[in-house]
Amino acid sequence: MTGQNVVEEEQAPSPFGMSRAAIDKHLKQILIDVLGLDADDVAGFDGDTGLFGHLPELDSMAVAGLLTEMEDRLDIIIEDDDVDGEMLETYGGLLGFAEAKIIEG
């Protein structure tokens, strides 16, 4: 079911923006759209799911597209200095990074 939309109704936003559940849904949809991953596979991602170095679709060239889509869809700005291997190592790292950037505003 590649490309299936997993972003549904969002929970009420926190004072800092989107709820964690909403960020999770948006981020999973970005991974589906940018990397062409199967929606059912991505739905099973948890904090320990490996990303960079674990998903062949997420190579160094795909990272730029992923970050650009995150900026556009989550309305955040990602500076070059923000990007490191740790944030891309696991889904939990990427989700935590996205949450922090949304809170940072």
Image (tube, rainbow, N blue to C red):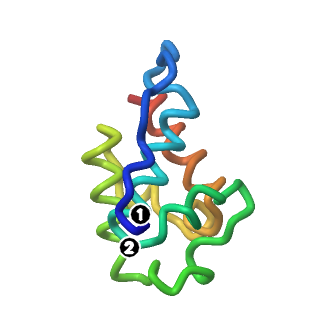
In the rendered image, residue 103, in percent from the top left (x then y), is placed at 48, 28
Instruction: Point out the residue furthest to the top here.
Output: 15
* Quadrant housing the C terminus: top left
Q: Does residue 51 appear left or right of residue 1 in this picture?
A: right
Q: Are marks 1 and 2 in contact (CB under 8 Å)?
A: yes
Looking at the image, the residue that sits furthest to the bottom is 56
Q: Quadrant of residue 2?
A: bottom left
Residue located 43% across and 62% down the image: 31
Badge 1 marks a residue whose secondary structure is helix
Q: Is residue 13 above or below residue 18?
A: above
Front residue (pair 36, 55): 36
Q: Residue at x 65, y 59 (%)?
A: 44
Residue placed furthest toward the front: 1
Please name the residue that numbered disc 2 is placed on: 36
**SS of the residue at dot 2?**
loop
Give how far apart the Cα atoms at labels 1 and 2 are.
5 Å
The 10 Å Cα crowd at callout 2, few under 14, some 14 to 19, many 20 or more, is some
| Vertical position of residue 104 compared to residue 90: above or below | above
> Where residue 90 sits in the image (x, y, percent)?
65, 64
**Which amino acid does the dot numbered 1 rest on?**
Ile
Residue beneath disc 1: 32
